Image (tube, rainbow, N blue to C red):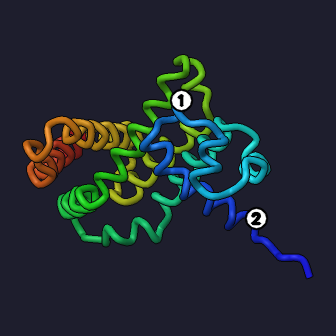
Amino acid sequence: MPKIVDRDRYRKELLNKCFDIFAEKGYSSVTMREIASEIGVSTGTLYHYFPSKESLFEQLIEYLSYEDTKEEALAELGNPPTLGEKVENLMNYLSKIEDYMLKDMLMTFEFCHQKTRKEIDSNQALQLAGKRYEDALISYLGISDPALARFVSCYIDGLVARRFYQGERISFAEQANVLKEILLAYLDNK
């Protein structure tokens, strides 16, 4: 009797295994053959699920943004009653997943480094991932202004980037307080 394979689940398993490879080696430094070898599948199997390295990477970006913004993932943040408490919970959560976020950012930057501005702007996977994160922030923080969600997203990305080369000098707790004050003052003036 032939083996029954859940193709979608197997594709997700392959994507999970590829994350660390792209994060450690960079998009341009690794070939499909190397990826297949490192995750223990044949090159043919990898090409069966992903027609190209770019397709593999784009599907990885889409998958990660979906997994990171699912209700189950966001449930870890809790549902405190005030915006200030939500910001504190968000920053505490970010401090726990900082390494993952940094890898995700570096991997994405390296991929984009190989592209033109027009290619980046028209890349559906990148645009969808950005929109999902913004929508998740809108939902979690209880704000309705998309520009404010983009601001918070930029603030978080900048915080993670600064901690990459400034280390503990940049405090999540301190920045949580600053972000909380900025958001509350902005919303009070609206």
Image spot of residue 181 (x, y percent): 12, 47
Instruction: Answer few, some or many: residues within 10 Å of disc 1's Cα (few below 14, many 20 plus, some between 14 and 19).
Output: few
Q: Quadrant of residue 84?
A: bottom left
Tell me the kind of residue under disc 1. Answer: Ser
Q: Count residues near mark 2 (Cα–Cα under 10 Å), then give few for <14, some for 14-19, many for 20+.
A: few
Is the C terminus in the top left, top right, bottom left or bottom right quadrant? Answer: top left
Tell me the amino acid under the disc marked 2: Arg
Q: How many numbered callouts?
A: 2
Residue 52 against residue 90 in the figure, above or below:
above
What secondary structure is marked by label 1?
loop
Dot 1 or dot 2: first in sequence order is: 2
> Looking at this rendering, what residue extends furthest in the right direction?
1
The foreground one among 175 and 96 is 96
Q: Residue at x 55, y 17 (%)?
A: 116
Looking at the rendering, which quadrant does residue 91 occupy? Answer: bottom left
Which circle marks residue 7 in the picture?
Answer: 2
Residue 124, position as x, y percentages in the image: 62, 36
Tags 1 and 2 in contact by the CB under 8 Å rule?
A: no
Q: Residue beneath label 1, please?
A: 28
